[in-house]
Structures are given as C-alpha cells and as structure tokens.
Image: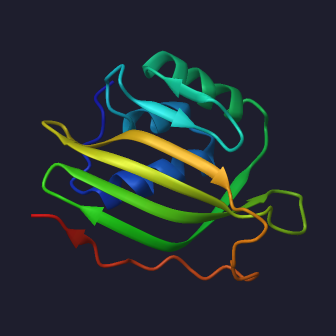
Amino acid sequence: MEKALFASPQDAESAFYEAITKSDLEGMMAVWADDDDIYCVHPNGARIAGVERVRESWRQIFSSGQTLRFQLREQQTVQGMMLSVHSVYEVITVAGEARPRGPVIATNVYLRTERGWRMVAHHASPVPASASVAAEPEPRRAASPKTLH
C-alpha cells in the first residue's frame, strides 16, 4: 500500500489525529516515517522506539474499543526547511464520558522526506495540576509557524 504524500507538516498532523479518532492503524502508520529511529511516548508511558514497536503500541490503543475525540489548543510551531516541531494541548474526550479528561501536552516532530512530511517523534504527557489551562477548550486555530533560517 502506497503511503499518502503529506505536502506540509500540518497535513501530516491532521492525518495523525484523524487516524486516532478513527482507530485507523494503517492511517496512523502512514503518518510515521519508515525509520527505526522513530519514537513515541504515550501519557505516563515509557519511550517506544522503532517502527514495529510504535505500530504495536497504537494497535493496542486502538484495540481497546474506545472512541477518542481530540480538541487541539494553543499550538506552537517551530519550522525549518527539513524539520517542524509542534507543541499542542490535547483535550481528549472518550465516547460515553460526560467530561473531557485532563489535558495532555504533546510534542509532535515532523521530518521532510523524499515522500513528504513524516512524523518521527510523538511525546505526550499529562499537564501538571499546577499548570494554568482553561477549562473550556478553544477550537483549534492555525498558528503562524516560526521559520528557522
């Protein structure tokens, strides 16, 4: 199966969150680079490195049967010609639960490859209780990327 071509890191990020929402393992792995140096850290989890281990971690999450909805807030981006780093608050709602779970802060790193932009790292951690995060999530808005020279 041919992987999608993501023309921008934002396209790759949109596909990443769509794959989570749909519990789509193939869609998820289409976002990731085919490189054993990729890594993923799920909230309160250990670092998982390599394509097969990252795939297995997402397979386990998706097999739980939970439908997750994400609202992304306060995205900050630092982007160069070959690398884009996104920091975003994820407000996660599980289908059937009345209230969103505590926010998670995620850092997503994308690398420009010959096949478009691909994720090379995802690190998600719970937001500390002492952090100031608004109770009501704001809709995701496009942030102006900062360009490195």
Q: In which quarter of the image is residue 143?
A: bottom left
Percent across and percent down for residue 130 are 76, 71
Residue 89: x percent and y percent? 58, 66
Locate the N terminus by quadrant. Answer: top left
Q: Which residue lies furthest to the front in this view?
A: 130
Image point (21%, 54%), residue name? 7
Q: In which quarter of the image is the C terminus?
A: bottom left
Q: Is residue 28 left or right of residue 102?
A: left
Q: Is residue 96 left or right of residue 129?
A: right
Left or right relative to 119: residue 112: left
Residue 145 % position (x, y) = 27, 72
Q: Which of 119 and 96 is in front in this view?
A: 119
Which residue shows up at 32% across the image and 32% down it? 33
Colouring scheme applied when the structure was drawn: rainbow
Relative vertical location of residue 49 with respect to residue 18 in this rendering, above or below: above
Depth order, front residue of 1/88: 88
Is 93 placed left or right of 73 in the picture? right
Measured as percent of width and height from the top left, residue 12 is found at 35, 51
